[in-house]
Amino acid sequence: MTSRHMPGRSRPGTAILLAAAILFAGVAAESKAAKVSAESESTARQLIEQGLKDDLAMNLIESLTTEVGPRLAGSEADARAVQWAVRKYRELGFDKVWTEPVTFRNWERRSEGAEVLGEHRQKLVVTALGGSPGGTVEAEIVRFGSVDELRAAPAGSLSGKIAFVDTVMGRYKDMTGYNGVGSARSQGPSVASQKGAVGYLMRTVGTNYSRVANTGMTSFGEGVQPIPAAAVALPDADQLDRLLKKGPVRVRLALDCGWGGEVTSYNVIAEITGSKTPREWILLGGHLDSWDMGTGAVDDASGIGITAAAAKMIASLPVRPKRSIRVVAFANEERGLIGARQYAVAHAADVAKHVLALESDSGSGRLYAFNYSSAAEGGPFLESMKNLMGTLGIEHAGGAGGPGPDVVPMAGKGAAWAWFGQDMTRYFDLHHTADDTFDKVDRQAIRQNVAAFAALAYMAAQYDGSFGSAKK
Ligand SMILES: [Zn+2]
């Protein structure tokens, strides 16, 4: 997932509560008639049982990360990933499989390095931030404890210097740690440039005390001079801190990376056609692209595997569900939800028909909570979900969650979303690093994810009621 569009905890404001109350009044009559049949619930229980033994997701994750490997959006490998997804979805026997083009500017990493100069000369482990320009700079570093401290620096005070933002990220089960430091990556370089800095270094946004650094997007404000920007591995950031206590530290930062021309990739879409209302969809999303250093196993081959395997189990039932299930492998999530934004534009007329949208993009940990945008309504669907998810150790967390990154653009247009809270305690050891590889994927947790995704998608496809999707 990206830093700028993460699912955070959302607390409804007064205006939303008011709107929900009005909506509730309108939906109440419909909800009375809406029901969950015992037959559907029993099928969902079967899907859960089957999901807990499922190895299709693991096989898909292994295949994508092994046969395609790293797949930076716009790269040759990204094109192979698209072919991989089309082939796999066809092999799985979905009713329809197609692609939709997604265009964006290319960004490439070619080489990167940094070293301390002078008496204590030594190499540092760094990685360029996505969106950084290339270039070699040699300058003294100036340390800041946070982006806010950097913001408070006087104008021009960093002239000819490299800014070093050194905020420590905490380890949490959810997004708390990431949310606390994300601005160091997304905004820090732009702020530093405005203060006159010629380069930017930051303590990596991660929790892994190995010599790996986490990449991820940054962007420069309108009219701001882009400067080379990189993340420093945790042990190397500590090293800089110790060296700074001994005196001024000069660093050479050399990045060969940058933006190129426009390229086209594809959202890959597969569908199980509904038996009663085929033009109503339950959307299950993940993203096909990854950063370029690891093989994108937890981010987000896991999501691709989980959603395809969940849908495949539903496709294997003797009877098609009432609504259609749509699996989307989104293009270029990492550089700003590009595939998801273009999907939302292409399908804007069908927002109300996207009955419920759900993404898997938080790694390969166990799920522990669920919620959906209209869960406050309560009613038979929520009661049924509480029972089903309870068997998987997943509790309803009212008021928690939000749309997954690739669901954000459709949710912005009015589509209802569902959310699973996934244990991310170890996620930021791997996220956007060279260590995001297949051996880190937790087989048992993936099975639990598949079971939950299949049950939720199936129940939503069978449910007579609405989740409130309506064009805004
Ligand atoms: Zn992701």
Image (cartoon, grey):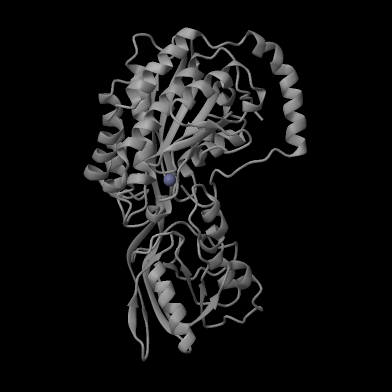
Q: Quadrant of ligand 1?
A: top left
Please say if 193 is above or below 275: below
| Residue 152 in sight from this viewpoint | yes
| The furthest residue to the bottom | 119
Residue 470 in the image, given as x and y percentages of width and height? 64, 25
Please say if 452 is above or below 205: above
Indicate left or right for 255 with 417 as reference: left
Q: In which quarter of the image is residue 292?
A: bottom left
Residue 164 in the image, given as x and y percentages of width and height? 50, 74
Residue 160 in the image, given as x and y percentages of width and height? 52, 83
Residue that appears at 25% across and 25% down: 91
Residue that appears at 46% across and 60% down: 205
Residue 471 in the image, given as x and y percentages of width and height? 64, 27
Please say if 313 is above or below 286: above
Q: In which quarter of the image is the C terminus?
A: top right
Residue that appears at 58% across and 10% down: 35
| The furthest residue to the left | 67
Q: In which quarter of the image is residue 83?
A: top left
In this view, the residue in front, 71 or 174, is 174
Residue that appears at 22% across and 43% down: 67
Please say if 136 is above or below 322: below
Q: Count the labels in the image.
A: 0
In this view, the residue in front, 338 or 432, is 432
